[in-house]
């Protein structure tokens, strides 16, 4: 069993622009284990957008598909990208046609982009042999949001999520091609991989548990964006659909996986992306 990370974008942002509600730079300074991997010595937070390639004895699975190339987006540094993401996948021995499953932890802009490629002016499936697993609650929620004409959400939120465009160019084309399986949030994917419900960030948000020969790993999804939220689970993402549910899911996740030996793989954690959640006084810390 191997899990490989393919990076699409890495970034550094000041805490005030990290999209985390309640974050306090002074409290960050109380978490010295964040420096230098997750927090630069200057106090900027490091983040990454990447996919995980999970190779089980049965199945080739891509977990989350980033932003994608050529997509027109409201956020300038996410728009019209031309990254070598697919070339890197091929160099790892994963041509797109070899992918059998795509799992989406949720259907946000930075988790569905490589579902499609611009081919002769139209959006075509990137992974035509793959079943794309989407949790029904998320699919139905974002389908309805994309169709809304009375969108009264704040401008920054509309820009960050770009819901209608994402639906049209990254979700609808794979659904119309018959490649989507709507699944429950605790679905089993193969004998080694299953979904774990962690709703809050979005209604159907899931983490992904991988188990083999008594060992296990879990891919967080956006249950946690930054390792500092492991120490401060009450710091929520400003993009959470339900902040209280997101916080509960995070607290349950930490209690379940702390000191368990399960390797935790952060969906937006920069290198070293994998580590263990360990109890630290009354809270937790990420040990990579
Ligand atoms: Zn994300």
Image (spheres, rainbow, N blue to C red):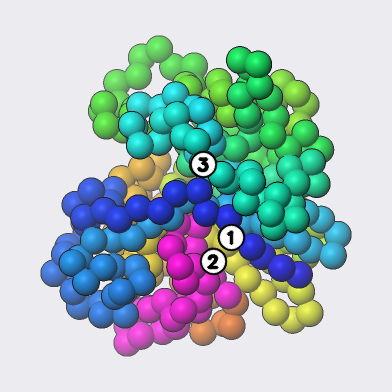
Give residue 207's position: percent from left, percent from top.
Answer: 57, 57
Q: Which mark is residue 83?
A: 3
Count of marks, rendered view: 3
Q: Is residue 46 above or below residue 262?
A: above
Q: Is residue 278 magenta?
A: yes
Q: Helix or strand or loop: what does disc 3 sit on?
A: loop
**Disc nearer the start of the sequence (3/1):** 1
The region drawn magenta spans 263-288
As drawn, the residue found furthest toward the bottom would be 281
Q: Helix or strand or loop: what does disc 1 sit on?
A: strand
Query: Depth-wise, is mark 3 or mark 2 nearer the camera?
Result: 3
Q: Which residue is mark 2?
A: 265
Local packing at callout 1 (Cα closer than 10 Å; few below 14, some 14-19, many 20+) is some
Q: CA distance from mark 3 to mark 1?
A: 15 Å
Q: CA distance from mark 1 to mark 2?
A: 10 Å
Q: Which mark is residue 48?
A: none
Left or right: 145 in relation to 227: right
Local packing at callout 3 (Cα closer than 10 Å; few below 14, some 14-19, many 20+) is some
Q: Is residue 45 above or below residue 20?
A: below
Ligand 1 neighbours mark 3 (CB distance < 8 Å): no
Q: Which residue is mark 1?
A: 5
Q: For the point 58% across and 46% down, which residue is it? A: 85
Give residue 124's position: percent from left, percent from top.
Answer: 68, 24
Local packing at callout 2 (Cα closer than 10 Å; few below 14, some 14-19, many 20+) is many
Q: For the point 78% across and 79% down, which residue is it? A: 213
Q: Pointers 1 and 2 in contact (CB under 8 A)? A: yes
Give residue 271's position: percent from left, percent from top.
Answer: 45, 68
Q: For the point 31% across and 74% down, which residue is it? A: 36
């Amino acid at each position: 069993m191997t899990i490989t990370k393919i990076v699409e974008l890495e970034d550094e942002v000041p805490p005030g622009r990290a999209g985390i509600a309640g974050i306090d730079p002074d409290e960050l300074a109380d978490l010295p284990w964040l420096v230098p991997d997750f927090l630069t010595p200057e106090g900027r937070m490091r983040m990454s957008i990447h996919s995980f390639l999970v190779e089980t004895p049965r199945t080739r699975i891509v977990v989350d598909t980033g932003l994608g190339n050529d997509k027109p987006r409201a956020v300038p540094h996410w728009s019209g990208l031309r990254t070598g993401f697919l070339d890197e996948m091929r160099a790892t021995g994963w041509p797109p046609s070899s992918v059998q499953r795509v799992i989406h932890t949720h259907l946000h802009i930075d988790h569905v982009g490589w579902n499609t490629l611009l081919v002769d002016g139209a959006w075509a499936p990137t992974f035509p042999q793959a079943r794309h697993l989407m949790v029904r609650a998320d699919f139905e929620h974002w389908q309805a949001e994309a169709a809304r004409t009375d969108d009264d959400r704040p401008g920054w939120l509309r820009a960050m999520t770009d819901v209608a465009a994402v639906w049209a160019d990254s979700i609808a084309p794979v659904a119309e091609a018959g490649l989507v399986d709507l699944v429950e949030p605790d679905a089993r994917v193969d004998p080694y991989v299953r979904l774990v419900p962690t709703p809050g960030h979005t209604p159907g948000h899931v983490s992904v548990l991988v188990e083999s020969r008594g060992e296990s790993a879990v891919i967080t999804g956006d249950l946690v964006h930054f390792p500092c939220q492991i120490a401060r689970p009450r710091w929520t993402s400003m993009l959470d659909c339900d902040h209280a549910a997101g916080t509960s899911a995070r607290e349950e996740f930490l209690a379940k996986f702390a000191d368990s030996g399960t390797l935790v793989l952060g969906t937006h954690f920069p290198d070293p992306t994998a580590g263990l959640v360990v109890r630290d006084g009354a809270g937790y810390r990420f040990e990579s």
